[in-house]
Image: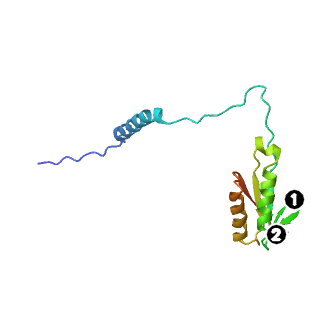
Amino acid sequence: MRTRKRRMMNQINVVPYIDVTLVLLVIFMVTAPMTNPGVVDLPKVGQALKQVAAPIIVTVKKDGLAEIDGKKFQRDALLFEIKKQLNTKDSANNPRSVVVAADEKTPYGKVIEVMDLLKQAKVDKVGLLFKPVS
């Protein structure tokens, strides 16, 4: 009995790849209508842009004192000053944001104390600013 040698196949079988591709296509076709597209509010023609008020910058020093516009404040006075600046007549229509600035020498706890005061003053928009030591 003679054994026949099998010849090597020199073509790639692409049928499994086509099967996987069709399954993925069906999955995407089924799930595509379920996704919620993002809505973009475009400005209307002739609509004036609102000018956003400049943020209040609270600079925290390494000794724990906070500064607004060059004036130094203790903890209780800082809360009063922030509330006073937030309650100006312009801020009723256009709420102002607050930026907390500190350098790398300022203890992290002092920055958190100021952020806690901002939370007590019901400030919604708070940003952080890093000031390198000069």
Q: In the orientation shown, which residue stands out farthest toward the right?
A: 70
Residue 133 horizontal side relative to residue 108, left or right:
right
Q: Residue furthest top?
A: 45
Q: How is the image coloured?
A: rainbow
Foreground pick, 52 / 114: 114
Q: Earlier in the sequence, mark 2 or mark 1?
A: 1
Query: How many discs mark residues in the rendered view?
Result: 2
Q: Nearer the viewer, residue 31 or 121?
A: 121
The percent coordinates of residue 126 (x first, y second) are: 71, 55
Q: Amino acid at mark 2?
A: Val
Q: Using the rendered view, name the quadrant where residue 12 is placed.
A: top left
- Whether residue 16 appears in this view of the structure is yes
Nearer-the-camera pick, 28 or 92: 92
Quarter of the image for residue 93 reads: top right
Say left or right for 50 vs 112: right
The residue closer to the viewer here, 2 or 99, is 99
Q: Which mark is residue 69?
A: 1
Q: Which marked residue is nearer to the observer: mark 2 or mark 1? A: 1
Residue ranking furthest to the left: 1
Query: Which label was assigned to residue 61?
Result: none
Identify the residue shown where x is 32% and y is 43%.
Answer: 9
Could you tell me which residue is drawn at 68 percent across and 58 percent down? 119
- In the rendered image, residue 98, in percent from the top left (x then y), is placed at 76, 54
Q: Quadrant of the C terminus?
A: bottom right
Classify mark 2: helix, strand or loop: loop
Give the distance between the C-alpha atoms of the residues marked 2 and 1, in whole angstroms.
Answer: 19 Å
Name the residue tied to disc 2.
133
Q: Quadrant of residue 43?
A: top right
At label 1, the amino acid type is Asp
**Where residue 35 sits in the image (x, y, percent)?**
49, 36
Q: Considering the numbered disc 1 on the image, is that residue within a helix, a strand or a loop?
A: loop
Residue 130 appears in the rendering: no
